[in-house]
Amino acid sequence: MKSTIKKLKCGSDLCVIDIENIDATLKVALDNKFIKICEGNVSVDLNGVKQRVVHYLTPKKGKTLEMGAIAEFFIHLYLNEVGFEPQFLFFNLEENSIKKGFDGYYFHNAEEWILESKSGLISTAGISHGSKVKESYNDLKGKLAGDVKNNPWREAYNHASHIDVGANLGVRANIKKFTTEFDNKVYHKIDDFNIIPGSTIFLNGTWNATDANALEIEIEEAISKFNFKKIKIVCVTKKSLELFWQYLTTP
């Protein structure tokens, strides 16, 4: 996946990704990582897995769940491409739906990272990558602080325990510890975690490339009051929702 990396003042990376179309390079990346993202480390038919995603997304077409799932998928693709190892599956284990809890839990260079992804349409009043990054951060901060009904760590642990994920044993043990602590109402500040706030904006079909320099200034302002151990920010601009559908329905 093509990306522009901007080094922020805090020393962290801002990854700027523009997707105008599914070109040959992006199609190869999708083909290579699609099964791993959805099903884990298994040998199964790619088209069969694509049809499973179609089956899930079709009833959601035109709804926020469709947009959120597609946005999240491409961030997973990017992170997989740059060496982040997923400790989870894209799908929920209990039903044919996108998993709940954290949007992603990764292992990279002996460190654990938590992803939260937010998305929206360019037609939405006031939308910006900066606002979506803030939304991702605040949502993750709330989950870690216990401001949610369900225990997000339990879902993460269930995924890390799935044999096809092949999760790092140390990561799995850490997640189990956090699961138990959450159950006992022992919560944590976001300062203690490596986080990946993700933002995706879908255009209306008319392409407009991202000004990476302007976005860097916007993100610097957006994260100026964030607390974190380490942070990596991913901002994706896609021409339309239909690009993913074209990939899914093309053998």
Image (cartoon, grey):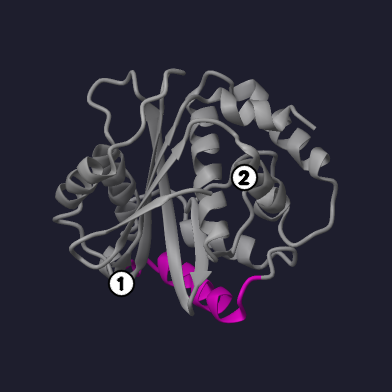
Point out the residue furthest to the front here: 24
> Where does label 2 land, which residue?
25
The disc placed on residue 177 is none
Q: Is residue 134 visible?
A: yes
Give whichever of 46, 96 is nearer the camera: 46
Residue 221 x %, y %: 14, 48
Residue 55 placed where, x, y %?
73, 29
Q: CA distance from mark 2 to mark 1?
A: 37 Å
Is residue 232 within the magenta segment?
no
Label number found at residue 192: 1
The residue under the point 42% across, 65% down is 182
Viewer-closest of 106 and 243: 243
Q: What secondary structure is marked by label 1?
A: helix
Residue at (30%, 72%) from the top-left corner?
Answer: 192
Residue flagged by tag 1: what amino acid is it?
A: Asp
Does residue 64 sit above or below 211 in this rendering?
above
Q: Report the side of 72 relative to 49 (left or right).
A: left
The segment highlighted magenta reads: 167-188
